[in-house]
Image (spheres, helix red, strand yellow):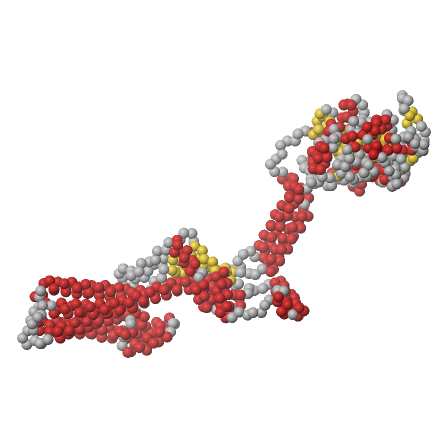
Amino acid sequence: MDVNRITLQGGRVLPEASEQAPMFDFGSALRVLKRRSGVIVFVTSLFLGLGFLAAALGVDRYTAGSTVLLEAPSLTPFGGDDLYKATKFDNVTIESQMQVIRSPLLLSQVVEDLNLSEREIFWEPRRGAVKQWILDRKDQVTSFAAETLGPELAGRLGLVPAEDPLSDAELFQAAVRKLRDDIAVTRNGVTSVLGVKATANSAELAADIANAVTQTYVVRRYDMRRASAEEASGWFEARMQELAQQAAQAEAELSAVGTSEPASGGPANTEEVRLQLRNAITGRLSAQSRFDQINLALRSKVPLEVLPQRLATDSFAPLYDAYTATNDVAERQALNAEAMGLMVDLRDDARAALDTAQAQEADARAALSAATGIEPDQSDGGEVSLLESEARIYRQMYETYTTTYLRTKELQTFPTVDASVIAMAEPPEGATGPGGMKLLLVSGLLGLTLGSGIAFAREARDPRLRTRSALSRSVGAPVLGLLPPPEKNVTPNLGPEVSVEAPQVGRVERAQGAVEGTDVLYLVPSHQMAVDALESEMSITLTNPLSIYADTIRRVRVAFDNYFAPNIGKRGSVIGFISEDHGTSRPTAAINYAEMVAVGGQRTLLIDFDWLEAYLSHSITPNAKFGVPDLMFTAGDNFSEELAFWVDERTGLHFVPNRAMSDTDTIGPAVFDSGRLIKLVHELSTKFDLIVIDFPALGSSVNAAALSPVVDGFVCTADWGKSDKKALAKAMATCGVPQEKVVGAIMSGVTEDEIARYEATG
């Protein structure tokens, strides 16, 4: 208690208003952590144990990732405009492609390529020693349950898993579903870059799966465009044949326009000549188409891929068969190289065939002119113009289709794809997620944080009195001192040891005398308290007057005399000890206070008014036959006042028990009359210098408030770590004891070192 911050108000000791408290008291927080260190250590140890168990039982999972770029540039080896423009990917399209990558159809191909459904590492991770031991114990329990209960009953109870092996198809589908769960596709911001992450039970498998997924996706995009090109080239070939026939017919009709009569010396039937011209034109167009396709195949360097087999000679047939039968890239390159050796002769033959067809067309045109005797430009202008337009349209359509067909074959030969792998997955160096040490570190931090939180929560919810300030606020009066427990009630070693003489028995004379200066007689009891029966803590002020306990009792007397006597015009003659709950600290403090005053020579009376427990009466006068009720009603043949009093011959302390200690004695309800109690105390105060009253608990009796008119002051006792501060404050506010008569409070059962753990030292 800082005496420099004590002020007087109406003769009372009041602490000064404390300075504004800081926003956060680090010292208090550290004291809380130190006091609750056991909780913190326990919770932290528990979390560390759980972290170690999780690390031991956990499995290592590895994550590898590859990257796919959409909107790949197209390849145009022969020049010219692109047949197909590059795909433009908007947000919706990109999101759709992310779903395509995780589609069961694509993942089924990955499962088949990597044979995941048959690989044990895909299904089961590598087990640690602890987990393997647990699984072995589980297998033992399962086997024991199956043997004891039977397989059928154990299976029904769930102790033994049902043996229902999956078929190959079900196992494959299960692998696809598991792979879908292990694949994650993300988008890099708003770009067209997609990241494919695969998680597996080994680093190598994770990288293999990530690469397989991206490559399968790109290959499927490639195959899709190539298939589209093949389908388009077939369609163009069919349309070109139709256009060739239509163009030949149109040109033949154009050549024969205006011929109605045959010329002399010519064929009699011009229809035959016209048919020859039509066939010649058709042959020339077919030869031209064959030459263009052969020339394209020659330039592509992959003739077996581009050139239709119907345009090749019989020498190409074995090569086509071998090319179709293999998917090996090296073998196909070798077959194309061998075919390239035959392509030059094939092209020369096609060139010669084209020249022949052109010459036959020229001869057919000349024969038609000779047969009709009319040049084509001398015929009727309107019909000729119509036929020329029709022929020109067919020729243009044929040329356009031919160009488109060549572009289609070009795309088929050098297909471009709108997705490409820009980063291949590499086996990760470490497992995904926290490792063993990191898991232990995180567990320790979590345990430390949670333990500290629990410590602060328990501290905040602790209703017990732990500090002098809390006791002062609850009582509404200053704290006068501490009462250490007997085993810790030491004498401060501040100098040479002081020898204290033990109190002597027999100092009180057994005679009746008179109060000096008055006509009042005082009685000397015939009953002596058995000194040996007194417990050691009841005489601390006599046996150890220099102890901290005795010093606190003296503080009570100093506070009582110095700050109450000036207000009432006399030295206090009646003081009561009160408390909120039951216990021994209050009556023990009361008897020590009474012994201290009595040994000083004052006539002192200690009254046990605790009707509920009567601790003092049971402890020091267990054989009492009279008590407070007998003093209130003195009528009776076998009773005199001195029979109700007991005396401690060491100090001359008088004591009135609460009542007769026999279980058969009863008391009447008139005993609790407040007026009679006040009158009794008043009469006794005329015979003694000081009366000390031990009142019952405030929450159980109103005696303290009822006797407050004749009590000069009260001292409240509370047990450290036991008394409820809220209950004490409520009891003090509702008990009816005048606040101005409360001298102060004392805290029992604690030392300065113990309370310093809860109070600031600065």
Q: Is residue 612 left or right of residue 300?
A: right
619 shown above or below 209: above
In-front residue for pair 542/396: 396
In-front residue for pair 574/347: 574
Residue sitting at the far top: 517
Q: Is residue 611 left or right of residue 388?
A: right
Quadrant in the picture for residue 754: top right
What's the residue at 80%, 23% (across, down)?
A: 570
Q: Is residue 135 left or right of residue 600?
A: left
Residue 719 in the image, given as x and y percentages of width and height: 75, 39
Quadrant in the picture for residue 143: bottom right
Give the number of callouts.
Answer: 0
What's the residue at 6%, 73% (across, down)?
A: 263
Observer able to see residue 492: no
In-front residue for pair 231/360: 231
Residue sitting at the far left: 264
What's the residue at 90%, 39% (across, down)?
A: 623
Q: Is residue 734 left or right of residue 659?
A: left
Residue 442 in the image, given as x and y percentages of width and height: 58, 52
Residue sitting at the far front: 669
What's the residue at 58%, 69% (across, down)?
A: 163
Quarter holding the C terminus is top right
Residue 760 in the image, given as x and y percentages of width and height: 67, 37
Residue 110 in the image, given as x and y percentages of width and height: 45, 66
Quarter holding the N terminus is top right
Quadrant in the picture for residue 314: bottom left
Observer able to see residue 749: yes
In-front residue for pair 759/324: 324
